[in-house]
Image: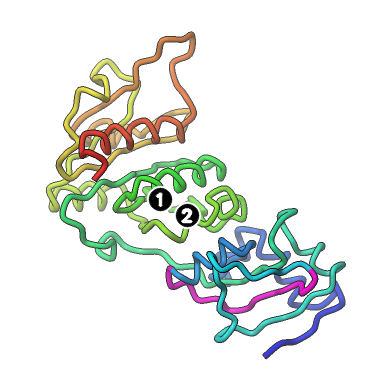
Amino acid sequence: MILEISSPQNQRIKNLIALQKPRERKEQQAFVIEGVREISLAQQSGYELQEIYLNPNLYQADLHYPISFEHSTTYHLSNAVFSKVAYRESTGGVIAIAATRSLTLAQLPKVANPLYLVLENVEKPGNIGAMLRTADAAGLSGVIVCDPNTDFFNPNVVRSSVGCLFTVPVASASNQDAKDWFASHGITTYAAALTDKAMPYHTFDYKTPSALLLGTEATGLSDFWLREANQQVIIPMKGKIDSMNVSNAAAILIYEALRQRDFG
């Protein structure tokens, strides 16, 4: 069914704008996806699209990123209304509301020799999005978030991940639950750290089941992981500062592990 909306005062338009706020996303268990590629990847990954908002003057179907309108209510928006609700300048003329979802550790896909990225207290949406893109490019087994306050459905995460939020399995867990799960599954944990105990990252063997742990740029990983991780690793720094952007650090560690695995 296709309905027309021409007034920015329409309640559904107000709700689209409201979903930019974390509280509304949490209460409604829903979030906004903008863009042809992002919506297509969300559908392909099994996300339920509740509503689709389309500007017929802007939307063009993409054979590489098809969108199905069959099971969602579709609303046609005028140019003025669409420009009011579009979070980005280039959305391809389509916006959707989808139900949020979160995997548990037990729901992560089972793979023979997993490689996980673990994020603790990483808050900046741009960094989260960048790491999801790297996780997708590297074909990681999953991303595990050890921070209940991380909002993966922030519009800036969806945007900066260019849809990789939907292509990479993302699970949430407490630090203790993650530690116990790694131990029970024979997964070695490597904590990125600026400590005297940390050894250069390239001196370790990542060819067996592994999890790479990174924390916030300001304070790094918590004492829990510095104490409980199997190994502490450091990226040697030749300049005047002692740390780099967390998404760059993640990429370095991930691709060293892939190199050792012959990129398999």
Q: Earlier in the sequence, mark 1 or mark 2?
A: 1
Residue displayed at 25% across by 53% down:
177
Query: On the picture, is 209 further left or further right than 82?
Result: left
How far from the left and from the top, in percent, is residue 101? 44, 67
Q: Residues within 10 Å of mark 1 (few under 14, many from 20)?
A: many
Q: Is residue 149 above or below residue 216?
A: below
Name the residue beneath numbered marker 1. 136
Q: Which stretch is magenta?
A: 45-57
Query: The residue under label 2 is which amino acid type?
Result: Cys
**Nearer to me, 123 or 27:** 123
Name the quadrant containing residue 248: top left
Looking at this rendering, what residue extends furthest in the front direction? 63
Name the quadrant containing residue 105: bottom left
Residue displayed at 33% across by 44% down:
117
How far from the left and from the top, in percent, is residue 203? 20, 22
Residue 101 is inside the magenta segment: no
How far from the left and from the top, in percent, is residue 157? 56, 51
Query: On the picture, is 107 further left or further right than 151?
Result: left
Name the residue beneath numbered marker 2. 164
